[in-house]
Image (cartoon, helix red, strand yellow):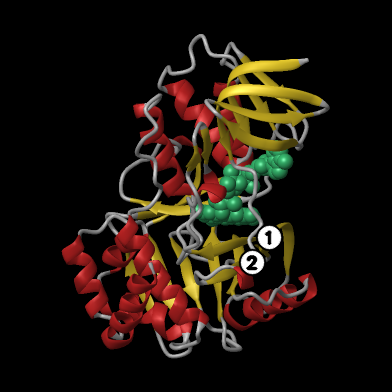
Amino acid sequence: MTNKHDIAILGGGLAGLSTLYHLQKSGKLEGKSIVLVDPEGRKDTHDRSWSFWEAEPGPFEELVYHRWPLVTVHDSKRNLDCDISPYVYKLVRSVEFYAHVNEVIDGIVGLERITAKAEGVKAVGEEVHFSAGGADYVTGLAFSSLPLHLRPRQIKEPYLDQHFRGWFIETEEDTFDPGRAALMDFRTPQHGEARFFYVMPFSKRKALIEIAIFSNNHLTVPEYDALLKTYIYDHWTEGDYKITHTEGGNIPMTTYPFPVRDRNLIYIGMRGGATRPSTGYTFLALQRQLTKLARSFPDLTNIDPWPTRHVMYDATLLRILQNGELPADELFVDMFAKNPPERVLAFLNGETSLAEELSFMWSTDVFLFGRRFMGEALRR
Ligand SMILES: Cc1cc2nc3c(=O)[nH]c(=O)nc-3n(C[C@H](O)[C@H](O)[C@H](O)COP(=O)(O)OP(=O)(O)OC[C@H]3O[C@@H](n4cnc5c(N)ncnc54)[C@H](O)[C@@H]3O)c2cc1C
């Protein structure tokens, strides 16, 4: 027997749940029958922390676990202290996000949740077909965030993994400034890659410290842990601390042209290209895209997550990093040293005007960037 629904949400992580949340909040799901499919079922854990910066309160303002008005950026020679106003750096934990969003989603009258893998997903004419848990489904529309596994060597576009591991720690002595987060701290041997730490203090004694590496060579857990241990000892405390929680993962950074739709099958989340290729940040752009999508729904004609010219800037930057043409620590710290911090953050969020982008580009190695930018333009 085939089950019929109006809408399928395939993948109930950040993108799938956010899609349902924004559509429900805009009153677009009344009278619709919806099926939400995820093998992990209803999520309720702290499996990731989403940090991002924004200038105005966002749709999940009440869930923000901590805010930092100041950030620091470091390499082996420079320690920059940046007031990022009007931006604020924020962190939302998945545990609060899932609880809040699930409560709104529970109000959708026509929703059925299925704990199974969606398989054989395909657009067929005006419908989307798939199977899950041994049953066949046909829907008029589907939003899919099922992961797409790219093989870096098989694609022409620049590709770097951002792999990372973080420790939530509690120190025995006052160690941190809870008003100041380290956005990029490159004070660790680079090994020809981009290696840096994020430090997000929640109080004088509690912080999330994360090592992030832009490279296609992954480390083992003991190797990430050794880097974290040395960094904390060298720059934060020689005293004791306990690790209360860990998290880690991988974010593909690429300008691979992720398709955003195949007829009535719409791709969302990382699968739909919502990740900023040059930084790995996804949360803010995804919420921005889905807020807009919910407003225009059922019109789905203009749903690209990033403006094309930003994708070109990212291809340029990623290519330079991947070819090792400029040391990453120099490149990123230079951006903050030579520009007002709010301009760098606006640029990375895709919120700058063309004039601001040109002045931003001018602060870089303009001949190298210009040459690579032309190369990327000709490739397309
Ligand atoms: C640990 C971690 C920390 C991160 N931190 C940040 C951050 O600080 N800031 C930021 O902007 N971004 C961050 N990201 C990147 C990005 O925001 C997240 O990866 C985000 O969860 C991506 O959303 P998504 O919906 O595309 O993928 P996911 O949230 O991973 O959701 C995909 C869902 O698909 C389900 N699924 C898989 N296969 C199937 C199948 N066959 N059928 C049905 N369902 C399936 C999975 O169970 C999962 O629930 C982080 C990523 C990770 C992993």
User: How many numbered marks, from 0 up?
Assistant: 2
Q: Where residue 274 sits in the image (x, y, percent)?
A: 47, 50
Task: Inspect the image, locate mark 2, and give the three-letter code of the amino acid beneath it.
Answer: Phe
Report the residue marked by disc 1: 248
Pointer 2 local density, CA inside 10 Å: few below 14, some 14–19, many at least 20: many
- Residue 262's place in the image compared with 193, above or below, is above
Q: Where residue 30 sits in the image (x, y, percent)?
A: 48, 11
Q: Quadrant of residue 174?
A: bottom right
Residue placed furthest toward the right: 134
Q: Quadrant of residue 337?
A: bottom left
Answer yes or no: is residue 202 visible: no
Residue 164: assigned label: 2
Residue under the point 40% across and 68% down: 314
Q: Is the CB atom of the residue marked by disc 2 within 8 angstroms of ligand 1's nearest atom?
A: yes
Residue 347: assigned label: none
Residue under the point 59% across and 42% down: 145
